Image: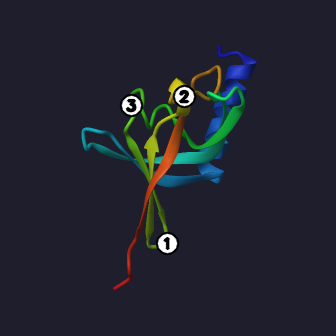
């Protein structure tokens, strides 16, 4: 029998996938594309500068159910969001040598994928 926290993680992941997620396309560097649902999040990275200070960099994160993304994300993969007639393209990356993805919970129900914005493609409706 699953423990109570594991059941809670799975319950929350299922509710987020059905109520606060959106459809996105995950494109591997090999060109293979998957249609997945993702909950949008963010992570702020604090990096040391050469001058001795710190710099804050924020990534757009995609929390994707593990069963929809059955492989480890690779740097350079892309996540494409369609907003109206506009495609917004994000690349899997994290600053300063940080990990570009991690599990979002102890039960490993979702992967948290860190990205950066790389392109916006405006399309004109016909």
Identify which residue, 93 or 9, lies in the foreground.
Answer: 93
Quarter of image, res 50 = top right
Quarter of image, res 89 = bottom left
Q: Position of residue 125 (x, y in %)?
A: 38, 82
Q: Residue at x 49, y 54 (%)?
A: 23
C-alpha separation, residue under disc 3 versus residue under disc 1: 28 Å
Closer to the chain start, of discs 3 and 2, is 3
C-alpha separation, residue under disc 2 versus residue under disc 1: 33 Å
Residue that numbered label 1 is attached to: 84
User: Image quadrant for the C terminus?
Assistant: bottom left
In the image as oriented, which residue stretches furthest toward the right? 4
C-alpha separation, residue under disc 3 versus residue under disc 2: 16 Å
Residue that numbered label 3 is attached to: 74
Indicate whether 80 appears above or below 1.
below
Identify which residue, 83 or 38, lies in the foreground.
Answer: 83
Q: Position of residue 113 (x, y in %)?
A: 52, 36
Q: Position of residue 94 (x, y in %)?
A: 52, 34
Does the residue at mark 3 contact the one at mark 2 (Cβ under 8 Å)?
A: no
Q: Identify the secondary structure beneath mark 3.
A: loop
Identify which residue, 54 or 68, lies in the foreground.
Answer: 54
Numbered tag placed on residue 96 in the rendering: 2
Indicate whether 85 appears above or below 69.
below
Closer to the chain start, of discs 2 and 1, is 1
Q: Residue at x 72, y 30 (%)?
A: 53
Tell me if 41 is positioned left or right of 25 in this view.
Answer: right
């Amino acid at each position: 029998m699953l423990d109570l926290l594991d059941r809670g993680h799975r319950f929350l992941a299922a509710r987020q996938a059905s109520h606060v997620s959106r459809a996105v396309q995950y494109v591997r560097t090999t060109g293979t594309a998957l249609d997945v649902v993702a909950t949008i999040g963010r992570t702020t990275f604090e990096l040391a500068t050469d001058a001795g200070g710190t710099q804050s960099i924020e990534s757009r994160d995609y929390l994707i159910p593990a069963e929809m993304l059955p492989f480890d994300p690779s740097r350079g993969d892309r996540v494409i969001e369609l907003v109206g007639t506009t495609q917004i393209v994000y690349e899997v990356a994290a600053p300063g040598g940080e990990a570009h993805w991690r599990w979002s919970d102890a039960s490993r129900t979702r992967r948290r994928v860190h990205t950066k914005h790389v392109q916006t493609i405006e399309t004109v409706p016909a």
